[in-house]
Each structure stands twice: as structure tokens, then as C-alpha cells.
Image (cartoon, rainbow, N blue to C red):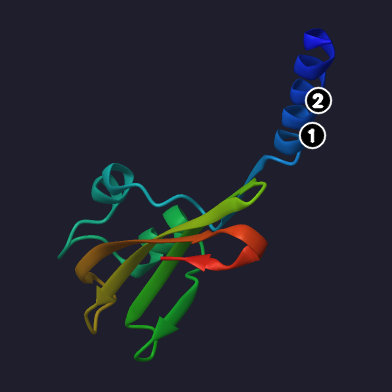
Amino acid sequence: MKRYVWLAIGLCLLMFFSGCGYKSQKQGAMIDEASVDKVVVDGQTTRQEVVLEFGPPTKTMEDEKMFFYTWTETSKSSVPLYGGETTVTRELIILFDDDGVVKNHKIIKTARESKSGFGGQKVK
């Protein structure tokens, strides 16, 4: 009899955790501080060199005097009764002078995490 109880408990646990999963989705090219610092030098690097290295920017502003490159990774975890999502974003912002030379650049990193409990309700 004990054997069947343990078997039933094992099957219940297996069914409970079989819904677990992990998924990661990435957008854009990875922005790494070391590779940016090798290529982008304030007062030296030109707009053309930036485009050759990183490709067309995600967006531009100020008549293309500001370039933005964005990389985002979203990871989702789904465990029965509890799950969550983490989003990490890195944005490279490059400001050019009137001659098309890098005036200043900066990398901004942000992370956002959300968790959900029983029935998909948000957990703080």
C-alpha cells in the first residue's frame, strides 16, 4: 500500500513540474562595453566608422546627430502557480558634432523583473 502512495505522490509531482519552462528572446545586436570602447573614441571616430562597425542605428534624432543602438533580452520562466519575466536592455547613445565625429557616447543598462503567482496575478 505504501508503495502506491509514493507512486501517486511521484506522479502528482511529475505532473505539477512538467509545466515548467524557460524561454529567452533577444532583439538587436549585443552591446558590449569592451567592444564599444575599442571602436568608439570621443573626438576621433566618425559616423561612417560607427555605421560600418554596428550597422544602421535603431533610431536617430537631431538630424542624425544622435544615434541609438538597442539590445534587449527577455527571459520568461513558467512554473505552475508561480512564474516570472526579466527584461534586460542596453542602449548605446552616440552624439556626433557638426563634422560627423563622435562628441560623446554612453551605454545605459536597465533591468526590469516581474513575477506572477497563482492564476497569473502579479506579485510585488
> What secondary structure is found at the residue carrying circle 1?
helix
How crowded pointer 2 is (Cα within 10 Å; few <14, some 14-19, many 20+) is rated as few
Q: Is 123 above or below relative to 79? A: below
**Residue for badge 2:** 11
In the picture, the quarter occupied by the N terminus is top right
Location of residue 63 in the rendering, given as x and y in whole percent from the top left corner: 38, 91
Q: Is residue 95 left or right of residue 85?
A: left
Q: Decide which of 104, 121 is in the foreground and name it.
A: 121
**Residue at screen point 72% across, 29% down:** 13
Residue farthest toward the bottom in the current orientation of the protein? 62
Residue farthest toward the front in the current orientation of the protein? 1
How crowded pointer 1 is (Cα within 10 Å; few <14, some 14-19, many 20+) is rated as few
Location of residue 34 in the rendering, given as x and y in whole percent from the top left corner: 27, 42
Q: Decide which of 74, 46 is in the foreground and name it.
A: 74
Q: Are marks 2 and 1 in contact (CB under 8 Å)?
A: yes
Of the residues shown, which amino acid type is indicated by label 1? Answer: Met
**Residue at screen point 38% across, 87% down:** 61
Q: Decide which of 28, 124 is in the foreground and name it.
A: 124
**Residue for badge 1:** 15
Location of residue 55 in the rendering, given as x and y in whole percent from the top left corner: 50, 60
Q: Quadrant of residue 12?
A: top right
Q: Is 63 above or below relative to 86? A: below
Disc 2 to disc 1, C-alpha distance: 6 Å
Q: Is 18 above or below relative to 121? A: above
Q: Quadrant of residue 89?
A: bottom left
Is residue 73 visible in this depiction of the protein? no
**Residue at screen point 20% across, 56% down:** 41
